[in-house]
Image (tube, grey):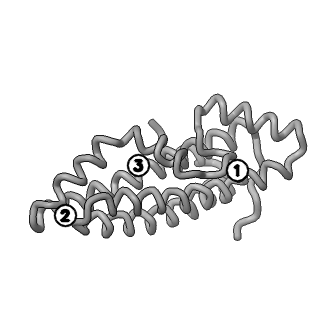
Amino acid sequence: MASARQMAAGNPELAAAVQRSRRLLHRRALVAAVASTVPVPGLDWAVDAALLSQLLPQVNAQFGLTPAQLDQLDPHKREQVQKAVTLVGSVLIGKFITKELVLRATRAVGLRLTTKQLVKYVPLAGQAVAATVGYTTLRYLGEQHLRDCVQVVQQSQLRLPAPR
């Protein structure tokens, strides 16, 4: 499966949006990794959910896919975007990101999150594994979302907003 960066190749504006989003994703994944090392039951899950609920709207904004941005489109273009979202199958594009939506998205990586919970109680090595799993889990979810955003933009031929 192609990465968001590969999918955006040939379109400098789209590639720049992917790069900005990946920077945001990397920072949040580092925070998730640190939170994963703390041996407090459930803390890392709460941190992951909070990070994703902040990150996903920021990524959507990079691609012009927040609810407010979509509301500003003419009806025909909005319909094109909604069709593309349906084809991609994303529940996180063009919607207000709620805890329920984040939890639905994280079900796909539930085994990783459970493993992270268990291994962090092993001194040192377990915390390193938990941090690695925490980082890669958030990165995986973020990369999936990035690919979905790129597909929607390409399929609907949506014009990207100016970078902030």
Looking at marks 2 and 1 on the same chain, the residue that comes earlier in the sequence is marked by 1
- Percent position (x, y) of residue 11? 66, 50
Q: Front-most of 127 and 114?
A: 114
Residue drawn at the location 65% of the way across and 53% of the way down: 14
From the image, tell me which residue sits under label 3: 140
Residue drawn at the location 19% of the way across and 64% of the way down: 128
- Residue type, label 1: Leu
Residue drawn at the location 49% of the way across and 57% of the way down: 52
Give the CA separation, mark 3 to mark 1. Answer: 20 Å
Circle 1 Cα neighbour tier, 10 Å, few/some/many (<14 / 14–19 / ≥20): many
- Residue type, label 3: Tyr
Q: Quadrant of residue 74?
A: top right
- Percent position (x, y) of residue 57? 62, 57
* Residue 127 placement, left or right of 102: left
* Residue 104 placement, left or right of 158: left
Give the CA separation, mark 2 to mark 1. Answer: 36 Å
From the image, tell me which residue sits under label 1: 65
Identify the mark at residue 128; answer none if there is no mark: 2
- Quadrant in the picture for the N terminus: top left
